Amino acid sequence: MAKYIFITGGVVSSVGKGISVASIGRILKSRGISVSVQKLDPYLNVDPGTMSPYQHGEVFVTQDGAETDLDLGHYERFIGVELTQASNVTSGQVYSSVIAQERRGDFLGGTIQVVPHVTNETKRRIKKVAEISQAEIIIVEVGGTVGDIEGQPFLEAIRQMRKDEGRDNVLYIHVTFLPHIAATDEIKTKPTQHSVNELRRIGIQPDAILCRSDKEISSGIKDKISLFCDVDKEAVISLVTSETIYEVPLLLEDAGLGEFIVHRLGLRAEKSDLGEWRDMVARLKASKEPVIIGLVGKYVGLRDAYYSVREALCHAALAHNRDVRIEWLDSEQLDGMADDKLRQVQGIIVPGGFGYRGIEGMIKAAKFARERRIPYLGLCLGMQVMVIELGRDAFHTDKVNSTEFDASSSYPVIDLLPEQNGVKEKGGTMRLGTYPCHLVEGTMAARAYGSEVVYERHRHRYEFNNDFRQPLQEAGLVASGLSPDGRLVEIAEVRDHPWMVACQFHPEFKSRPDSPHPLFVGFIGAAKETLVEGAQTSLPLN
Ligand code: GLN
């Protein structure tokens, strides 16, 4: 039978609750305990797939094609698990399934209420993760902060879980923030006391409190929190802002959290083995020569929009013993100054995106990369942009486009598949999740992967248009990754270029700090050889 750890947040959001959850997963895994994770998001959207990156940051895609919260990315990267759609539950999903049951007549005669109907549906979904994963520990993060109106039914559901599952099988951890007042050089505990009071009002007494702060907290502060919040002092864990997120499992382990959880839940565990993780963090923190990558996108003002891309670049750079320095280039502003900005980077990456805004700047960046022989990695939209740019050059017209941006283009090199043409709804109607991709021998992609078939995650509507495969191949395009039936171009690259590789899928979702993604490793490998000032032409031909 699985045991549960529920994580709530207090005081303010964005203090790294997701990273803490992922880190707890890692420290348990390092003791030989199997772990699965779930995020309960209180908003009413069915999934974040229809939300703007400005609202929500990146949409993370699981192998089974769920569009989920970016915290699932942290969980997968830290714990090394592959999660499923069951791992992200929103209020929107819970309410729509309760209402669908009501319409079907499942509760005939009854009044449908938050307690017990919404809470029962929530608990059913929590237990489903235990069932699917068969893990010993299920860590469940409740999104938002305690006190949010929307989060109340989830908190009520997790409160009931302690009674349902048995007191020794459920643990509550509250993540708070301790502000530092500069004028008096003091760390304040009052907001934490208030948020713990709010939790208790609902009936949840936390077993441990993770105190996020920018400065180390003293033993006296721990005493105070322990006293006012009624938590053992050993369970008041200080989590000071760290240099790299990957250090957090080490900080929590060293602060005794692993020991506390194992003891409290009566788990049979091995000795903690974080040796390799510790080495990885030491290598990450060591100062290294940087490799400068220009990331050209339209959401660069909000870096969370490209979270997995940023992490994948960092993992791949580490594999080359480099630091990555990302220049965030707003594709809408890549006008006359484009060349100046692009000249200062060693590699260009164009990540995913939707809609016409900013596209022309991305095309400009792809052109720069192709002509100046700067390493380029295109991710989903970044592949479509690369194909459009090559087409414009080959066919000598700016009419070349994707039908997403110009529905009446006479050169629609990127288009919907015929079977997608009738689709009207926006939510959940894309090609989503893992598909196989066969690599074509002798290509850069095949060399990077070193295997024949790979499985990668998709999230897009548009595809490479085969009507143009022949002429584009004549113009220098290489279709280096294909669907098993050969019909879909999944990876494309440019011939006689040091590294210009782009894929229709999102490799960034599969990169891990201890297992970087081959396409990113290949890209950084080429980028690190690129000299910033005019020496690109000395690169050997592929
Ligand atoms: N907008 C493009 C499509 O729908 C690319 C999507 C993406 O980059 N994820 O095909």
Image (spheres, rainbow, N blue to C red):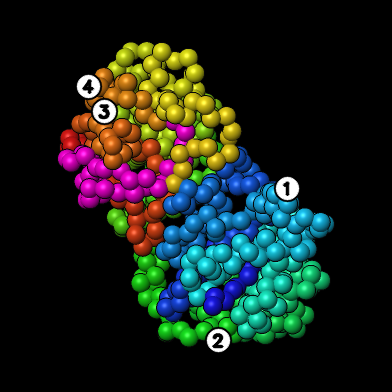
Q: Which of marks 1 and 2 is in front?
A: 1
Q: In which quarter of the image is the N terminus?
A: bottom right
Q: Name the residue under label 4.
A: 474
The numbered disc on residue 266 is 2
Q: Which of marks 3 and 1 is in front?
A: 1
**Numbered disc 1: secondary structure:** helix
Please provide the residue range marked out in magenta. 434-462
Seen in the image, is 256 located left or right of residue 172? left
Mark 2: which amino acid?
A: Gly
Label located before the other in sequence (3 or 1) = 1
Label located before the other in sequence (2 or 4) = 2
> What is the distance, in whole Å, between disc 4 and disc 1 at their CAs?
58 Å
Check residue 450 for magenta coloring. Answer: yes
Q: Nearer the viewer, mark 3 or mark 2?
A: 2
Seen in the image, is 313 located left or right of residue 224? left
Q: Which of marks 2 and 4 is in front?
A: 2
**Numbered disc 3: secondary structure:** strand
Mark 3: which amino acid?
A: Leu
> What is the distance, in whole Å, between disc 2 and disc 4 at their CAs?
66 Å
Q: Name the residue under label 3.
A: 477
Q: Which residue is drawn at 17% across and 35% down?
A: 541
Label 3 environment density (alpha carbons within 10 Å; few <14, some 14–19, many ≥20): many
In this rendering, is residue 95 above or below 381? Answer: below
Check residue 314 for magenta coloring. Answer: no
> What is the distance, in whole Å, between disc 3 and disc 2 at their CAs?
59 Å
Residue 166 visible in this rendered orientation of the protein: yes
Label 2 environment density (alpha carbons within 10 Å; few <14, some 14–19, many ≥20): few
Instruction: Report whether the residue tagged 4 is closer than 8 Å to ligand 1.
Output: no
